Image (cartoon, rainbow, N blue to C red):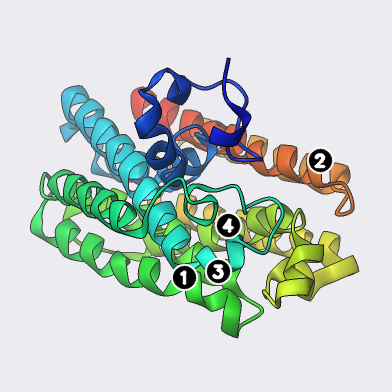
Amino acid sequence: MIDADKKVADALKHSWVYWLPHWMWPYAQLARWERPIGWQLLMWPCWWSLMLGFLTAGRDTQVSQIIWYLFLFFAGAFVMRGAGCTYNDLVDQDIDNQVARTRSRPLPSGRATRAGALIFLALQLLIGLIVLLQFNRYTILVGLISVVTILVYPFMKRFTWWPQLFLGLAFSWGALVGWTSVFGHLTWPPLAMYAGCICWVIAYDTIYAHQDTEDDMLVGVKSTARLFGDNTRLAIVILYVSALMLFAIAFGLARVGLPAWIGLACVGMHMAWQVTRLDIHDPNKCLRLFKSNSVLGLFMFVGLTASVLFS
């Protein structure tokens, strides 16, 4: 049986995290280990861009290299998502304490100290650096630059109505490093994919942010959910169509095969399904639609992987 006062209000009821020693629970919750959707959404652009790069590289690609790089990007996404959440909670402790959904998190509830959270953050960043150092020098440089986007994101909700844009800059970075891990430089296909991912992130995080619009108004937090308001559906349509167009440009420039285009078509249908199901006044439905974007990511990845295998 799990003690109610040791869980975060919106955490999953059943998770492998609760098999850990109790003293680790607050730190696992800081890193959101019990919520895989975050690292999955961070990982998909890495895996998409990696497979796009291997597809462009052609027959020189080794299966063992693909598997190794997929593992590295999985590990990097898992640990850096945890580091980002820990840092975000350190910055937002005062805000989290005023929002019903977040006041039970480890820092505002007092189950973790700021000193402990800082040490935990440092350990996660160290592991992330070890993963990054497995790649070529150009990828290491591009990866280190991404830290800037991570650092500024938590502050944006205080100053701009577009914090989701800055989340997009950070969460889409994998679209750059996936490609550079293969080629050691950037060119137009990964840049188009990066821009498409930014539109995708803004859209799905706007849906997610509609869970907190009432609390956000009370504490003065800005978001695209509040900015778009009743026009959210139209905004999501524009963002998703823009994302699809940019993904198509990336695919065209990389000359992908038919399976990748089929995967992209499935992505488009999933986006359309989200738009038709969206109800910004139903927080539970917003959360389900947000989480469904991991399925969208799988569609794209399977299509690109099939193109690599059949090429």
- Mark toward the start of the polypeptide (4 vs 3): 3
| Residue placed under numbered mark 1 in the picture | 153
Q: Give me the residue at 31% from left, 43% from top.
A: 79
| Relative horizontal placement of residue 281, taking residue 55 as reference (left or right) | right
Q: Furthest-bottom residue in view?
A: 159
Determine whether the residue tagged by mark 1 lies in a helix, strand or loop. Answer: helix
**From the image, which quarter does the C terminus lie in?**
top left
- Mark toward the start of the polypeptide (2 vs 1): 1
Q: Nearer the viewer, residue 182 or 251?
A: 182
Q: Is residue 307 above or below residue 201?
A: above
Q: Give me the residue at 64% from left, 38% from top.
A: 291
Of circles 2 and 4, the one toward us is 2
Q: Amino acid at mark 1?
A: Tyr
- Where is residue 52 shown, x and y percent of the image? 37, 44
Of circles 1 and 4, the one toward us is 1
- Mark toward the start of the polypeptide (1 vs 4): 1
- Where is residue 155 shown, x and y percent of the image? 49, 76
Of circles 3 and 2, the one toward us is 3
Q: Nearer the viewer, residue 60 or 153?
A: 153
| Residue placed under numbered mark 2 in the picture | 285
Q: Give me the residue at 17% from left, 30% from top.
A: 65
Q: Residue 94, which numbered label?
A: 3
Q: Residue 201, which numbered label?
A: 4
Contact, CB < 8 Å: mark 3 with mark 1?
Answer: no
